[in-house]
Amino acid sequence: MIRTSLLAPCLALGATLSLDAQTWVEAGEAGNLPATAQTPVGVGALTQIDGNLNDPAEPTGAGNDRDMYLIQIDNPATFTATTVGGTVLDTQLFLFQQSGLGVSFNDDSGITTQSALSGAFVPAPGLYLIAVSRFDRDPTGLGLEIWADTPFTTERAPDGPGAANPIDGWNGIGATGITGSYSIFLTSASFPNLTTSCADLAVGGTGAPGTNLTFSLTGADPNAFAWLVIGAVPGTTVINIGPLGTLTLGLVDPFIPHPIGQTDASGDASGSIFVPPGLPFSLDLLAQGFSWYVDVQHGPPGPATVSFVFCTSGVESFHIGN
């Protein structure tokens, strides 16, 4: 393990860097089936989805709109999703597996005609589809309702005649012109991570002043150089090294690169950051790990070729300060 202090550069950035807002705003018109569901783009916690049930293309009125989004559920035990306080519409919320099989549904939260879901029926962390509609616009499997209409105030696993089938359509298409905006408030959810990482990065520690934060890169290429990049804005940065290769990072410049040593025979390496005592501010940051080595391919035929081989982890969030 290599122990070093990176806080001096972080302090210099502390006054200006902050995480992007963790809200996704519906882009255009979200689809209503797994193949057309909208995928929120970002990194880290997803705490809110804002959209509109107002699709002029609906043949029986714009209010028959229904929107579906792909989300990452991090911890089913603490997951929640609700439109309470986020709309004046009488909503319904539905949760599906990526395959389209139903997970849970709620119509009325019990105190309002808005809706609330928990992770009670979520089998494991992972990618799920969440859908919102106005009252009585219901998903179907093989033409049959996946959930029964009642009881209205109970969160339920699929219990309708189409419960065993994945969603393939919606019913309840009576003409309506009632439209409106909505916010779905989320806890223990993240932007979906659809990138394929060849390594994992884990961040250990609280980030409290006077303690260490540990960054552990695992599963990278063995006997390679290991680095961290630390920043505050998720996105994509492509570093082109000409004919030698390309490194694609999940952070937007400015970020701080720092070596953490060399991976072992298993592709693992770790380093730590010391958070100074008396730190005068707190800061949310993002980290990504990557490894690299030089690959030389000898002829014949032709001359030897040289390239850089990169292996990146996903982007992880952490906090420094009280």
Image (cartoon, helix red, strand yellow):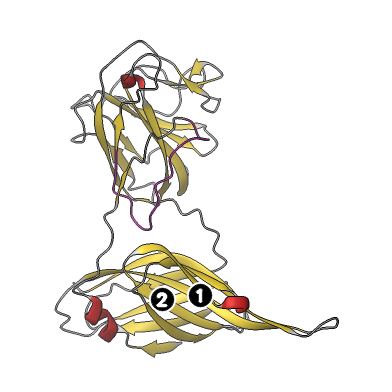
Magenta segment range? 33-50
In the rendered view, would you say 292 is above or below 188?
Answer: below
Image coordinates for residue 133, horizontal then vertical, percent: 34, 26
Is residue 221 visible in the rendered image? The answer is no
Please tell me in which quadrant of the rendered image residue 275 appears.
bottom left
Please tell me in which quadrant of the rendered image residue 307 appears.
bottom right
Element on which disc 1 rests: strand
Disc 1 from disc 2: Cα separation: 8 Å
Q: Tags 1 and 2 in contact by the CB under 8 Å rule?
A: yes
- Left-right relation of 243 to 262: right
Q: Which mark is residue 290?
A: 1
The answer to whether residue 46 is magenta is yes
- Foreground: 68 or 26? 26
Identity of the amino acid at label 2?
A: Val
The answer to whether residue 109 is magenta is no
Task: Write down the residue under mark 2.
Answer: 229
Q: Which mark is residue 248?
A: none
In the rendered view, would you say 78 is above or below 184?
Answer: below
Please tell me in which quadrant of the rendered image residue 54 appears.
top left
Sequence-first tag of 1 and 2: 2
Identity of the amino acid at label 1?
A: Phe
> Which residue: 32% across, 88% down?
5
Main SS, magenta region, reads loop
